[in-house]
Image: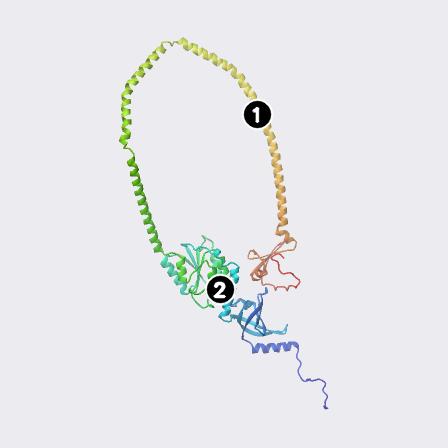
Amino acid sequence: MDIFENDEQGGNAPEFTVSEISGAVKRVIEGEFGHVRVRGEIGRVSRPSSGHVYFDLKDDRAVIAAVSWKGQAARLSVRPEEGMEVIATGRLTTFPGQSKYQLIVEDIAPAGMGALMLMLEKRKAALTAEGLFAPERKQPIPYLPEVIGVVTSPSGAVIRDILHRLRDRFPRKVLIWPVAVQGEKCAPEVAAAIRGFNALTPGGAIPRPDLLIVARGGGSLEDLWGFNEEIVVRATAESRIPLISAVGHETDTTLIDHAADRRAPTPTAAAEMAVPVRLELLSWTADQGARLSRALTQRLDQRRQRLADLSRALGRPETLLDPARQGLDLWSDRLGPALHAAATRKRAGFNSVAGRLHPGILAGLIARERRHFATFAERLAPALARLRRDAARENSRRRADLVTLARRLATAERLRLDGLAERLATADRMRQTLGYTETLKRGYAVIRAEGAVVTTRQAAETAAQLEIEFQDGRLPVLAGSAPKPKRAKSEPPDQGSLF
């Protein structure tokens, strides 16, 4: 039997509040695991509109919640994807609101070469399914481009090799877009360079290239990883300018090689593909000119020989002209006597007729003609009067017909215009009824990003700025300016840009 009864067991133990316990646990975990590297498989990746990335790291026996804040997520060298095996670097902390701990991820690296190759094959299969590597998308390389755009590092040996090879083969104008060819900035800078060259206006102050070369020297798979990024592959596939990929050595293969119009084993080979050898072209042109001259000379000789052969089958000009010359001499001898005889006959006939002519005959002829003309003059005045009356009646009739036709034309024109106006009003009413502006009046809206209509949530999440069109105007909205509201389970998923 105890001398002092103590009803409360452990009465001397201190009491903690829930916040004190949570804070103590937080300090212990952050102190012990302030910097850790965790290897595991990524699962359940979530990217809300806030820009943060939430995912799980798991193995066959446990799961750790992980988060990469917006600023850190933008600097990650590897974009987290479900199923990847990675090594995540960061620090452990707690989330008191749910009594759990989580890993704040600062960097992610693939867990070995096998994981990189697996991710590469998975990405390649997805892009192949979209048709970005299809042969029918390939564009022909111009035979002799005027301007060549080169996307590479300006400080490496690659650009010197390309310029040296172009200068040796066929000097051309070269525009260099400096980019990082390794590291975090590689993919966005290369994609921006390709799209920047395509955005140049033909005939502008800066000439638009006729051919693009994306080049980099050899390296490991990690060094060349920027050219496997989806943003680079899509920019290459969308390029309207023919593009040659010259990334790495002959044994190195990246996804940009599949999307490019041509793949060069080395940057030097890309320069050789871009232009022909000027001396060889000049030699070929000289050979073709010599062949043309020989063919022309040979053709003229053949034609000359053919003409000579045909001319031998024709008679001599003297032979053709001698009969005509002889006939002319014969008729010239007979011409003088014939003219004399003809003049004699005509003179005799004139003398016989002149003996019968005297003034009385001419006076009688003139009198008959005068009577004849007088008769016609008497008949002419009534005929002219009848013609005038008939013309006046015809003009009156035609004037009346013209007035009638004018009235009918005015009536028909007014009826035609009324019909067209009615059809136009009907079409306008139908346009207004079927147009999307009527849909906006019923409470819907249109979302655009960079001038294009946004139809998916993923496009809206990745856009830098959105523009919402309501019934009474448009409203610009930053894509990450407001947290995305939670959707109830009963709510249907997003259906597009009208909501």
138 lies above or below 342: below
Counting residues from the start of the chain, the first of labels 1 and 2 encountered is 2
Task: Indicate the secondary structure of the residue bearing disc 1.
Answer: helix
333 lies above or below 152: above
Q: Quadrant of the C terminus?
A: bottom right
Disc 1 crowd rating (10 Å Cα; few below 14, some 14-19, many 20+) is few
User: Is the C-beta separation of discs 1 and 2 under 8 Å?
Assistant: no
* Alpha carbon separation for disc pair 1 and 2: 90 Å
Disc 1 residue type (three-letter): Asn
- The answer to whether residue 372 is visible is yes
Residue 445, position in %: x, y? 62, 56
Observer-nearest of 136 and 417: 136
**What label sits on residue 87 in the rendered view?**
none
Disc 2 residue type (three-letter): Asn
Residue 324, position in %: x, y? 29, 27
Residue 30, position in %: x, y? 57, 76
**What label sits on residue 395 in the rendered view?**
1
Residue at 58 percent of width and 77 percent of height: 29
Residue 474, position in %: x, y? 60, 55
Q: Quadrant of the N terminus?
A: bottom right
- The answer to whether residue 68 is visible is no
Of labels 1 and 2, the one closer to you: 2
Q: Give residue 492's quadrant in the image.
A: bottom right
Residue at 62 percent of width and 37 percent of height: 415
> Which residue is under mark 2?
228
Taking the view exactly as shown, the residue that stands out farthest to the front is 313
Residue at 32 percent of width and 44 percent of height: 299
Residue at 33 percent of width and 47 percent of height: 292
Task: Indicate the secondary structure of the residue bearing disc 2.
Answer: helix
Q: Is 306 on the left or on the right of 130, as rendered?
A: left
Disc 2 crowd rating (10 Å Cα; few below 14, some 14-19, many 20+) is many
